Amino acid sequence: MSLPKTLRAQEPEWQVCRAEAGAAAPVLHDCRPAGDVIDPQGRELWLRSVVQRPQGDDPVALYVVGVASSEAWLNGQKLGENGRPGASSAMERPGRYEATLPIPERMWRAADNVVVVRMSSFHGLVRLDGPIAAIMVAPYPWPSRTVPLAIAFIAAGALFAAAFGFGVIYSLRRTGSSLALAAMGGVAGLQAVLESLRALAPYAYPVHGLRLVGIWVLTAAFAVLLVSYVVSRFWPQARRPLIALALAAVAATWLAPGFDLKTVLALMVGLVLSAGVAAVAVHRRIPGARLPLAYLVAFIAIGGLFPNWLVDLSYFLFALGLVLPLLMAEVVRLGRDDQEREVVLTRAAARPNCLTVASSRGVERVPVGDIVAVVGADDYVELRLTNGRRLLHAARLDRLEQELSASFLRVHRSVIANLDHVRGFERDGGRGRLLMDEGAPLPISRNRLPTVRDALDEHGPFNRPGADPGG
């Protein structure tokens, strides 16, 4: 989370100095202004500033927030240390990213209190443009982060729930849009957790680089998934080139300075490309495109006016506001589909000449005469139809054996054959095979061989024109 503005306003002006050992504290000389960026990466740095005690009776502390180990003195007395700074990587012990050094009241002078901070950063996993977020004297304890943390966790929980819901829908329907939305919910939820990590655990400063890289990667993934979803829904013909463009543009944001800018640009790439696709859909009068376009444009405006707020907080609200309504709409649609399927199944029950096939694509009535064979596969069966078609049906082989007409015969533990489509019979060692009008021969179990031969003799398939009696 960003630093509170009330604390930022109390940051002192720092000077970079040379240091020599003293009796109780280091002695600094040759001081010069530190400038806008304090950068201890790959070196040991000595800082000096003159501060005044903040007004009020509240306790006071020195806060050091950044990618560095540090130790500090006030008016020649040591306040404490965060890790152990040193002149080399071997001499340094990494400290925490956020350090709080309480200041005893007895250390304060009436005016011109001198703060000295020694820091170094040799263990950062990535080089940062702004490694030190703040060095400040402010009231203790740190202002509460309960509200933003609660918002982030509520958003994360809802996003993970939406990801689970779309994952279930994908397992039932196998639609690309539900898979993309499940991934979007999971990615945004993970980023909400990463963004809140500073308030959850006092991690060592090398972890901060990994955290920033993780935030950028998750944002980039969300941007590409957003483009993939919008393109698949409104402009599927342009799916491949637009996703390739999104990947290239998002990858290019890595070259931007600073991880905040990288992250904002990656998210804006996804928003702008998705808004462009939605605008094309509105122009073509594709139903359902106006609301997503308005939603995307609103967040593009927020990103332009408040980029830091977009990444820290409203990004989760954007993802939540997009994914949850789509989940509810998908659940309603699935309910309607199930009602329609029930109606079709009810009507089909009075049509014995057809088999009602329930698959992931919906419901289809298949004429029984078009079924060449039925092959079992656990809780599903594969219907082998005329013209080489194959269709998965959510039913068990045992139930179909009872429902199908007398022309169907169980010839193997996993195969039912339509005797109307048998054109011949041949032996295969101690077993046999049925030669069908279409497709590969069907195996006959050894214990079913007599029953199959009797059924063939009774059914008389070889009396049909062109039938081949085989072996």
Image (spheres, rainbow, N blue to C red):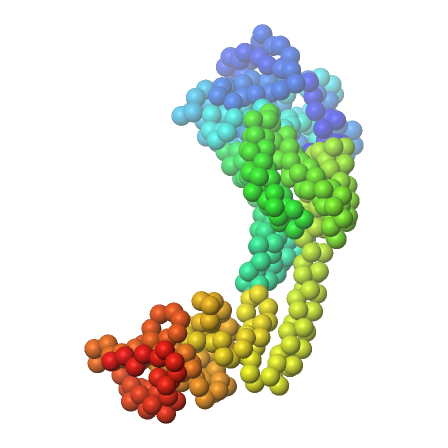
Residue 411 position within the rendered picture, expressed as x and y whole percent measured from the top left: 35, 82
Front residue of 214/82: it is 214
Residue at image position (67%, 61%) is: 330
Please say if 293 is above or below 352. above
Establish if 1 lies above or below 46. Answer: below
Left-right relation of 230 to 376: right
Using the image as rendered, state which of residue 423 and residue 242 is in the foreground.
Answer: 423
Which residue is outermost to the left? 429
Is residue 440 in view from this perspective?
A: yes
- How many numbered marks, from 0 up? 0
In depth, the one of 462 and 418 nearer the eye is 462
Residue 100 or residue 66, whichever sits in front: 66
Q: Residue at position x 57%, y 65% from top?
A: 361
Split into 4 quadrants, where in the image is the C terminus?
bottom left
In the displayed structure, does residue 65 sit left or right of residue 436? right
Residue 324 appears at what percent x and percent y? 69, 56
Q: Is residue 363 left or right of residue 340?
A: left
Classify residue 54 by image quadrant: top right
Residue sitting at x 59%, y 44%: 239
Q: How far from the left and from the top, in percent, is residue 71?
A: 55, 26
- Above or below, comparing residue 176 to residue 106 in the picture: below
Pick out the residue farthest to the top. 30
| The image quarter in which residue 307 lies | top right
Instruction: Please report the residue visible at 27 percent of the width from the left and 79 percent of the height from the top.
Output: 470
Question: Could you say where residue 275 lies in the image, as x and y percent from the top left?
Answer: 71, 41
Q: Is residue 417 visible?
A: no
Q: Quadrant of the N terminus?
A: top right
